[in-house]
Image: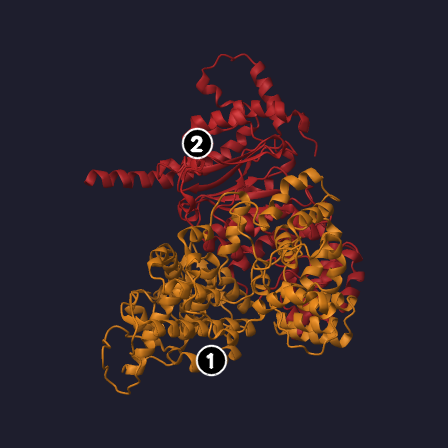
Amino acid sequence: MQFVKSSNVRRKRKSARLTGERRLGQYVHNLQFYSVPPSDNISLTEFEDFAIDRLKVLKHVESLGIKFVKGNEKYQESMDRELRKMMPIAIRKTSDEISDTDYDERRKDHISHFILRLAYCRSEELRRWFIAQELDLFRYRFQQESRDSIKQFLEENNLHYEPIPDKEKLKIIKELANSGYNTSVTTVENTDYFKVPFVEALDLVKSRKVYLERGYAYVPRSDLVSIVLSAFRAHLSHSLAITARAVPYLEEDSRLLPMLTALSKQYLGQDYTCKKANGKVTIDQIEPLSKKSFPLCMRQLQESLKQEHHLRHWGRMQYGLFLKGIGVMLEDALRFWRAEFSKKIDPDKFDKSYSYNIRHNYGKEGKRADYTPYSCMKIIMTNPPANGDFHGCPFRHSDAGLLRQRLASYGVSKDGVNEVMGLVSNSHYQLACAKYFDLTHNVEASTIGINHPNQYFDESQKILNPSAESKASMSSSQSSQMSWSHKSTPFSRRSTQASQLTPRNIKEEEVEFDDLQMSYEELDDMMSAVEKDEKATKA
Amino acid sequence: MANTNVDYDRNDLPVLLPIYYKKLFPYGPFYRWLNYGGVPKTYFCHREFSFTLKDDVYIRYQSFPDQHDMEKEIQKACPYKIDIGAVFSHKPKDHKMVKGTSFQALEKELVFDIDMTDYDDVRKCCSGADICGNCWPLMTIAIKILDKTLEEDFGFDHRLFVYSGRRGIHCWIADETARKLSQNARTAIAEYLSLVKGGENQIKKITLHDPLHPSIVRALSVVHAHFEDLALDKQDILGCKESWDKVLALVPDEALREQLGKDMTKGENSKQRWALLKGRVKKEVEKGGSRKSQLCIQEIMFQYCYPRLDVNVSKGVNHLLKSPFCIHPKTGRVCVPIDAEHAEKFDPTKVPSISQLCHELDNAMDTPETDEPAAKRRRDYKKTSLHTSVKIFDNFLDKLEKSWKGKLIQQSDMKKEF
C-alpha cells in the first residue's frame, strides 16, 4: 500500500453507474470475506478515519453483545439502529444495481477491515478480540441477506455446499428433528440439510445443536451461518497470524506504526497491567478488606480458601491475579497462599507444586509475561466452574437460592436481594454486581458500571477511604471506565511509540511452550469467542 | 477386596521399579503404538515424554530416537510416572536449540480424563481418592457412554480406555483425524460430551431441553440400565431424609417438590421411593401442571450418573497425560488398559500391583526354563497377570495397524508411479 498525503475519493455522487476510478467487479457483494487486501492509494487522514470508524463499529458490536442476548429481538434492534448510523452498508441488502455510495461504503468496509488487521494482529489477546467482534458483525450482516444473495455470496467465495438428497434425509428424519429446538418432522422435510465434517460446525457441536453421525454434522439451512462463520474464522485467524509475521517489515514507515499501535490500544481499557503491585495491601489486610471492598466473586474465593485451605487452578488464577491487581506483592502473595494451603498440605509440597504458579502470575517464570487480572467479561465467559470450583461470577454461576442466601447473609435487605435477583434472571450479571455494590456501599443508584473486579475494589476504596485512595484508583478507574467518547481523538500522529513494535516484542507475545503451566496459559489465551455464543444460546 | 497374595508397600517402589522397567514394561507394544507405523517417519522421535522421578522431580521434554533408546533411558531414570505429551515440530529434546516460536505442539491423541473425585457430591461410600465396588460402576457408565458417543457420533474407531491406577480412567483416541484436531475442535467435543455443569455454588447441574438430542437419548439408555443397581441399591440415594432432600432439590417446581417430600416418607427403601417419585412426576406432567419438571426424572438420573469429564485435559493439544502401563506410586497398581466392550467386568481392586507382578515373575523364574535367548526375555510380562492387559492393548493395536498399513501401501504405490 502506498499512502499519499493529499486525497479525496469520498465524494458522494448518486448515480446508478459507477463513476471515477470505481471498478465494477471489485465489490460485487455487500458481504465480504476479505480475502484480497486492498491495493488502492489512500491518504493518511482517510486511513485514520476509516480505522477509527470501524473500531467504533466493533466496539458497539461488542457492547451490544454484552448488553443483550445475541440474536434476540433487542439485540437485533439495537444492532440495526447503531449500524444504520455508523456503517449503513451493513444493514443495506445487496441489490443488483450497485451505486457509487454502495461502492464507496463497500470499499471503506474492505480497507478499514484490513487496517484493523494490521493493528490487531500483534498479540493473541488482540487477535481474539478482533476476531470475536468481526465474527459477530459478519453474522449479523449475513443473516440480513436474502437466500439468493447468500447463494451469490457463497459462489463468489468458492464455498460450495450441496444439500443431502431426500432419501438420505428420510432415513434420519427423527434424529434430525430431535437435534434442533422447535424442529418438527415437517420442518425437517421442508428444510435443506448439509452434511459437513463435524470440525466445520464446531459451534453447533459444542452446544449440541446438530445431529452427528460417524464424524459428520447434518446442518440445517437455518444454521448455515455457523459453517460459513467457521470458515470465516479459520480464514481470519490464519490471515492474522501471517500479518503478525509481516508487521515488522512495516517498521520503515514511521507514520504508520505509531498510529497502529495507538489503534490497538483502543481495545478497551479494562487493563490493570499498568498498575504494579506496590505493596499497598499487606496480607493481614486481605481478610478485612474482603468483607468491605471485594466484589462478591473475590469474597467468595477468599471464604472458600479459608474454609478449604485450597483452591483449584482457575480459582487460584482468578483470585491470585486479583490480589496482584489490588497491590499485593509477590513475596506477600507467596506467604499468603502458603499460610493457607499448608493447613492442609505439607509446606514443602506447596513450594513444589504451587509457588511456581504464583511466581508465574507475577511474570517471574516461564515466558515472563506479567499477567493481567481477569475482567468480568473473562470471568463470565470463559472457564466456567466445574465440580470443586469456587471461581467464576457468583451472579452467573450460582443457584438462585444460594445466591439469595448469600446476599442476605451479607446484610443486603430483602428488597435489595429481590432487585439484584431480578437483574440476574435477565442475564444482567454485571448490572447485578453494580447493584450489589450500591447496596453494600449505601450509595444511591450510582452510575458506576462494573466491568472489572479490580475496578470494583478501587471504586469501593474511593468511597470508604476517600483521602488515601485518590491517586492510584484514579488512574486505574480511568482506564477501566474509558468509554469511546474519551477517545474519539485518540492519538497524536507524531507519537513516538514506534519502538514498541519491534520484532522482539512480537515474539514475546506469541505462545511459547516451556512448561506444564504454559499449556493452561495457552489454553486460556486461545479460548475463543465461541464461548460467548454458547452462553447466548443457553441464556 | 484383598489382593491375591502380595501387598504393596510404598517403600518397596525404589527396589521394584527397576525390575518392572527391566523385565515387565511392554516396550514392544508401547513403541508399536506411538510409532504409528512410522507414518510419518519422525512421529515417534518428535514425541514428548516427561518423567516424574523420586521426590516429585519433574523433567519435561524427553524424546527418543527409537525403541531401544527409549528402553535404555526409562531403565536408567526409573521414573515414578511417565507422561505422554504432544508430537512437536522438532525433537523435544532439542527444544532449547530451536528458535523461539517455531517449536510447536502439532498433534496428539484426543484424550479424556475422568476422576472419581468429581463425583464426591453424588457418592456416599467414599470421597476423594478412595474408590470401592459401590462407586466404581460410575466409571463403567462413563466408559460406555464415552465409547459409544465417540464411535457413533464422531466416527472415531481407535479408542483406548486405561485405568489411571487409583481413582479414575483415561481415554486415548488414536485415529489420525483425532490426533490432528485443533484446540477448538477438542474443546467442542469435550463440551458436547459434558452435561454436568456448574461449580460448588450450583446444586442443579443438569438442564435438559425437550426434545432430547439423539446422543442424550443414547446416554440415557446406558444410565437406565445401571441406575437401579448403582443409584438405588449401591448408593441408596433415597435411603434417608438427608439424601432424598438432596435429590428433591433438583426438582425445579416448588409445589411438586413439597408433595414429593411427603411421598418419600411413604416408601420403605430407595427403590420404592424412586417408583413413587417417578409416578408422581409423571402424573403431574401429564396433568400439564408442571412444565418445568417435565424432564426432571432424566435430570436427576444424569446428575447422579452421567460422566463428569475434566475438560481442561481434553482441550489442549499440549496437555500431558499419564502413560498406560505406568505404576501408580500410591497404590502400586499398573495403569492397565480396560476392555470397553466388557467394561462392567473390570474391577480396579483386582488390577495387579507391581509387588504382585514381581512376585509372580520370581515364581516363574524359579521354574526350569531359565536360559532363554535374550530376545524372548523381553516378553516376561507374559508370565504374569499383566498378560491379559497387554492382550487388550494388542487388540487395540492390531486394529490401529490396519489404518496405517493402508497408508503405507498408498505411499509406496505413489512412489512406483513415478
Chain corresponding to orange in the figure: A
- Whether residue B276 is visible to the viewer of this picture, yes or no, is no
Label 1 chain ID = A
The quarter of the picture where the C terminus of chain B appears is: top left
Kindly identify the residue that appears in the image at 57 percent across and 57 percent down: A372
Kindly identify the residue that appears in the image at 45 percent across and 70 percent down: A491
Residue type, mark 2 in image: Phe
Residue A136, quarter of the rendered image: bottom left
Pointer 2: what residue? Answer: B64
- Residue A462: x, y in percent? 69, 69
Crowding near the residue tagged with mark 1, few <14, some 14–19, many ≥20 C-alpha atoms within 10 Å: some
Circle 2 sits in a helix, a strand or a loop, which is it? loop
- Residue A398: x, y in percent? 67, 64
Kindly identify the residue that appears in the image at 74 percent across and 71 percent down: A440
- Whether residue A345 is visible to the viewer of this picture, yes or no, is yes
Rendered view: A83 above or below A161: below
Label ID, residue A82 = 1
Query: In the picture provided, is A107 more to the left or to the right than B129?
Result: left
Circle 1 sits in a helix, a strand or a loop, which is it? helix
Query: In the picture provided, is A407 more to the left or to the right than B222?
Result: right
Q: Do the residues labelled 1 and 2 touch (CB within 8 Å)?
A: no
The quarter of the picture where the N terminus of chain B appears is: top right
- Residue A531: x, y in percent? 52, 62
Instruction: Say yes or no: labels 1 and 2 on the same chain.
Output: no
Number of numbered discs overlaid on the protein picture: 2
Q: Nearer the viewer, residue A304 or A347?
A: A347
Residue type, mark 1 in image: Glu
Residue B363, quarter of the rendered image: top right
Label ID, residue B358 = none
Rendered view: A9 above or below B264: below
Kindly identify the residue that appears in the image at 56 percent across and 14 percent down: B367
